[in-house]
Amino acid sequence: AKDRSERIFSMAFVRLIRPDGTTLRDGEHDLVLYKGDSKKLEDASAYLSLPSERNLSESKLLSGSSFRVSGATSGLAVSTRDSFQISTLICSTKLTQNVNLLGLLKWRSKPSLLCGNLQKLMNVDGGEVIKFLQDTLDALFSIMMEHSETDVYDTLVFDALVFIVGLVADRKFQHFNTVLEAYIRQHFSATLAYK
């Protein structure tokens, strides 16, 4: 608005949440650069359906300076000569990069995958589980409460609880012992799972 002569020469974007609900992976990302009319580049609906990252094979195949993007996004071109890399590190206690942990935390949305997600929990990196300690415990106790009439999940939930207690007992995560103690004293309310 200050200087009308300045215009966008290129634009890139990245999706923080992937289609499976997990967050963008930590590390380097080679973004696709788009050129075109400034109004088009400022209109999110014009580019959000397009790819945001280049894959390695695509980068090698592209030659020349740019190519047009077809369809409803006419007016945008992919710049193949220019490149833009970013490095990301996601720090969150609500969003995870692990699809197995996400599957357990959101188990009600796909109950058919519950057995598999409970089994896969033991393969999730301990640091990721510890970050979501309270949410994971809440999910496990909710599973026990909502399936109290059957013992289908009892052993799997018990094994998951033993795994979590084992993580907290590990020297690497011992400072989370107070978090577990606080959870037991203040947040635990699964009366059917109390025993």
Image (cartoon, rainbow, N blue to C red):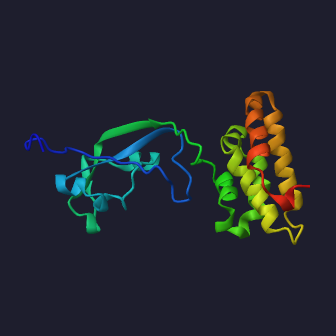
Question: Residue 45: horizontal and vertical position, in percent?
Answer: 30, 62
For the question of whether residue 37 can be seen, the reply is no
Which image quadrant: the C terminus? Answer: bottom right
Q: How many numbered marks does the figure carry? A: 0
Which residue is at a point 34% across and 49% down the rendered structure image?
Answer: 62
- Of residues 133 and 47, which is closer to you in this image? 133
- In the rendered image, the residue lying farthest to the front is 186
Question: Residue 56: horizontal and vertical position, in percent?
Answer: 46, 45
- In the rendered image, the residue lying farthest to the bottom is 149
- Of residues 99 and 134, which is closer to you in this image? 134
Which residue is at a point 12% across and 45% down the rendered structure image?
Answer: 1
Which residue is at a point 41% across and 42% down the rendered structure image?
Answer: 30
- For residue 24, side relative to residue 72 (left or right): right
Question: Residue 175: horizontal and vertical position, in percent?
Answer: 74, 29
Among the 4 quarters of the image, the one containing residue 131 = top right
Vertical placement of residue 192 versus 94, above or below: below
- For residue 44, side relative to residue 54 (left or right): left
- For residue 34, side relative to residue 134 (left or right): left
- Of residues 49 and 146, which is closer to you in this image? 146
Which residue is at a point 40% across and 48% down the rendered structure image?
Answer: 14
- For residue 42, side relative to residue 50 (left or right): left
Question: Residue 98: horizontal and vertical position, in percent?
Answer: 63, 49
For the question of whether residue 166 can be seen, the reply is yes
